[in-house]
Amino acid sequence: MALANANDADECATAAIYSDILAKPTAKDLLLAKLYKPPHNAHQRFCHHLTLEDCEQAQIKGEGTSHPAHCSDIHFEILRFPQTDVAFGHCSYLSGCHRLQMCKYMHFLPTVHPSAPPYEWKSSNANWSQPPPKGDAIALSELAVQHPSQALSAAGLQSWLVPSSPTSSHRHPAQLLNADLKLFDLTVLGKFDVIVQDSAFDIHMSLPYGTMTDADIRAMPIEQLQDEGFIFFWVTGRAMELGRELLEHWGYARVDELVWIKTGQTQRLIRTGRTGHWLNHTKEHCLIGAKSRSSSSPIPAWAHLGLDSDVLVSEVRDTSRKPDEVYGLIERMCPGGRKLELFGRRHNARSGWLTVGNQLKEDVIHEPELQERLDAYRARGGMGAPGNTRAAGRRG
């Protein structure tokens, strides 16, 4: 009995130590959370009542007492086409429906109450006093990308940024490289602190882009693009185990996994039946791999950990397009440095990033050293990279 009591006392003491010391955020964690607080109020709330009619009925019944007389949140109104039949219910594709003029299911259009006050865009940063164009999600994402580095620099904490190499001593505008990744020699690009890879896996479906075999993806020299840093590797349901194997093949330790929960236009879960052989897939997975120069941990010393959740809830848009929020998450974790996105498109372009893919149509290069390597690569007959380059504002 005495031994059991002693063990219980030890467990209580250990729990107290964990609660009082280990579980509490450090001073650095608290400071980062304060500095990284979004500098704008661009996120508008959706009313949990889907339509204006539902919201007004709820207020009449006394269920909407938390709202003002006219709810200022975003609602939806039903788009009524001649063929619309409300008995069919909601279209699974909603705003992504490709047969809008023929589809008999209900579709919706965002709206607010006509008496609601106009939305007022606010920013705590004087340099961002003007709001981006209405509905420009990429512009808002760009603010989130720039904010962590700017906040740390303004606070005199440049040492908390990813250490810059001689070729990336300042943050360059978004760069594009139109290249066929089956043929292009990636080692020409140099080294990066962060890589995002949304590989064109063959998922045995009709897709609006070309795909690569598992062997093609395995042959990519990803291991030569980083000496230290992170890779965010999007995988399909079929390729989750393959993705883990590829991370190990390229020299990474899988340290975490990000799950994207897909919602539709009305902020409900996506249940389209388009993906998944047994269950409807409402999520996607992004494996996170890391490598470092340290032998004791694969995590680079400059990374800021524990700031974001491993679950991201965001709306589905174009085919294979990932959430813009991922860029802000990466920048909070790895502010500054040199970043690469493979298999990217125009909507992926962000400042501080090089986006590479075969649907970009042109090159936009701002790093002189990178432009010199690309020119030399093409001069010796390098494959996979057309020469329609606009370098540092100059069209070639």
Image (cartoon, grey):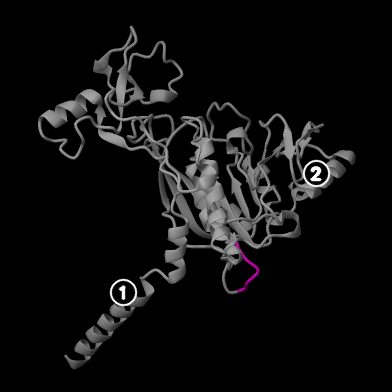
Q: Nearer the viewer, residue 262 or 108?
A: 108
- Where does the image place residue 281, in percent across and percent down from the top left? 40, 38
Q: For the magenta stretch, what is the residue range?
A: 291-295
Judged left or right of residue 376, residue 229 is left
Q: Is residue 354 above or below residue 148?
A: above
| 182 w.r.t. 193: above or below | above
Looking at the picture, does residue 94 appear above or below residue 30?
Answer: above
The percent position of residue 343, horizontal first and vertical second, equals 63, 39
Q: Assign the N terminus to one quadrant of the image.
A: bottom left
Residue 126 in magenta?
no
Q: Secondary structure at mark 1?
A: helix
Q: Name the image quarter holding residue 230.
A: bottom right
Whichever of callouts 1 and 2 sits on the residue coming sooner in the sequence is 1
In the image shown, does 293 or 241 lie closer to the viewer?
Answer: 293
Q: Quadrant of the C terminus?
A: top right
Whether residue 327 is visible, yes or no, is no
Find residue 371 and name its label. Answer: 2
Q: Residue 270: in sight, yes or no? A: yes
Count all numbered tags in the image, as a single digit: 2
Question: Which residue is situated farthest in the bottom direction here?
Answer: 2
The amino acid type, in three-letter code, at marker 2 is Gln
Horizontally, residue 305 falls left or right of residue 298, namely: left
